[in-house]
Image (cartoon, rainbow, N blue to C red):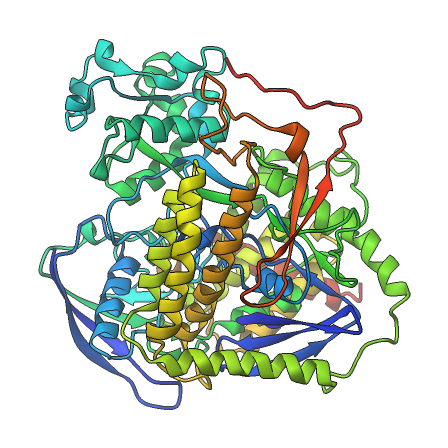
Amino acid sequence: MNFKLKIWRQPNAKSPGKLVNYEVRDLSPHTSFLEMLDILNEDLLRRAEEPIAFDSDCREGICGTCSLTINGEAHGPDHPGAVCELYMRKFRDRATIMVEPFRVGSFPIVKDLVIDRSALDRIVQAGGFISARAGSAPEANSILVPKHDADLAMEAAACIGCGACAAACPNGSAMLFTAAKVSHLAVLPQGHPERDNRVLKMVRVMDAEGFGNCTNTYECEAVCPAEIRASFIAKLNREYARASMQRGAGE
Amino acid sequence: MFPQTEMLDLVIVDGYAKGIITRSLRSGKIDAHAAEAVVLATGGYGNVFYLSTNARGCNVTATYRAYKRGALFADPAFTQIHPTCIPVSGEHQSKLTLMSESLRNDGRVWVPKRQGDRDKVPGEIPEADRDYYLERKYPSYGNLAPRDISSRAAKEVCDEGRGVGPGGRGVYLDFADAIKRLGEHTIRERYGNLFEVYEKITGEDAYKVPMRIYPAVHYTMGGLWVDYDLMSNVPGLFVIGEANFSDHGANRLGASALMQGLADGYFILPNTLPNYLAAQMGKRPSPDSPEFRGAEADVRARIEKLLKINGSRSIDSFHRELGLLLWDKCGMSRHEKGLREALQEIPELREQFWRDVRVPGSDEDFNQSLERAGRVADFLEFAELMCMDALERDESCGAHFREEHQTPEGEALRDDENHAAVFAWEFQGAGQPPRLHREPLHFETVHLTQRSYK
């Protein structure tokens, strides 16, 4: 297969960037999108040009490191799935493909297609944890969790933290991400001691990082590689309201 | 927290591990971190093979740098090749994806009996012309034979020219019988997510055509030597998880990496580390001390050297070549001749790397090429240690299969008399052969026997 590419090149956060035209030829349809970029980079190296910077790690959709906007869609056209799970057979031969980084004000560009998503780390640091005692194994049956709660927590915990939700949202909102992190701990007994503090602090940091708010467009749900449902945002709002009222009541 | 940071050296002060030198992958900034103790949780070295089921970022650098500072590296030849991965589809391949082992509960593994049938559509090959080789060779375990046996059996049938798919390196994992017996609904319930992953990667519907699988590098049992407190021979250097050599012997069993992660991190280290720290409180050196300055200077010099080469070959091309070489000569099965060849070829390749690799960009900036170059440089040294260990272990043992040592049935043949020991290697300086320490293994309750899966 052959493709024309328009790829965002930007030396660093302070310099302006632009789309640059490239071509790739004779690709197997079984080449993944990131492998296509590897091939292009090898080609650029041979021509003594600087390779295109892009992030990836596990290359099987579980780590959340890859982050490309392809033809305007976060993670490209093959939903649900991260860019690393996208294969060239999903494109028309000879198509022109536009590749950009995730575009979110709170994710400054580091270089080319690489963005700085440490804003998400800071949201998690604000409360995305539980206090666990280490040192000895607890009795497995001492804390019982109903199946429904376990399933719900698991569904929320599937979030890989890629930030596609914020990239797809017209408001640049990271509420789906924050909702997933708050919910997966809030529904489990192990997460209860910090339940109120967690949601209040995480939402405070989310706002301070400059992310927008949810206006129910559901673009986040459409691009989420982990299929996190937008209804978790409602759960986040309930958790927030509950914690605020507890605080208001002086508890 | 220091995300996007890699460790490039271990700092030892008066014989005690007291800190590390890091480089920010974002800004290129080199930093010295001083502490009372160092814990490495830096994972395994499977990516030395270039293609593995590991994430792309996995590397040997932290543990190998610790080895070069005096920590013993134990049993590096023990690498696990997992039988159920999606086969390589072409030269562009950048990583391999594991299909869960659970699939072998319901899938039947087969290849055509005749070479001539291997390009046929699987559905057109009648039952009588199929070789369900695991069921044939291991009637009591069948498709559930252990990982090393299943992997080697797949290699064998592919070496005979009966492998299927591109390049003839694949075997069928067929669910047709299970679907007939249990219904598609049940199979979908059990393995639906795996079938989806398979469809995404190969474009094939495994409910209709059999999956194709082939073994791939998955886990490394070897690692830095540690005692029961998970401390290496360097006081104050603790090593946990896949980065150490403990727990798995020569052949890790299913789910036990998770077990090790939990045991090391939750249950062992929280007890043993404080015990060590008690005597170290208040003994944190300054990151400006000569040991730190020296290690930092070494790190800077190496980076500078890499950037100065400005050769003609890409970093990945070296990594790929090293991977193929190891896969061929120190992979699923090894023999003396191949290992001796590898020990010739690896230093040649390394020499070529330091002469002709092209590392673009600078060290004061975000530079993914520099990051990869440093790792490949370490793999090129580490690979030699791996082959040395594989050559020295003149027996077959778990995942380490030496072709010269097998039973008439093709099973691993151990030499407990001479080799029932951990092989721990000590660095002796660049260009010098490492020194081998043998730690004998004593089995008090359960004694060593020859396994049988017949």
Q: Nearer the viewer, residue A26 or B149?
A: B149
Task: Please identify the residue farthest to the right as the structure is shown.
Answer: B279
Q: Quadrant of residue A40?
A: bottom left
Q: Residue at x 59, y 58 (%)?
A: B42
Quadrant location, the C terminus of chain A: bottom right
Q: Nearer the viewer, residue A196 or B91?
A: B91
Q: Quadrant of residue A171?
A: bottom left
Q: Nearer the viewer, residue A246 or B211?
A: B211
Q: Quadrant of residue A217?
A: bottom left
User: Whole-percent x and y of residue B378?
Assistant: 49, 64
In the figure, A136 relative to B149: above or below? below
User: Whole-percent x and y of residue B77?
Assistant: 53, 45
Picture mark count: 0
User: Whole-percent x and y of residue B250?
Assistant: 59, 36
Quadrant location, the N terminus of chain A: bottom left
In this rendering, position of residue A179 left or right of residue B198: right
In this rendering, position of residue A5 left or right of residue B400: left
Q: Is residue A188 visible?
A: no
Task: Please identify the residue farthest to the left as the structure is shown.
Answer: A94
Q: Residue at x 48, y 50 (%)?
A: B46
In the figure, B264 relative to B184: above or below? below
In the figure, B212 relative to B292: above or below? above
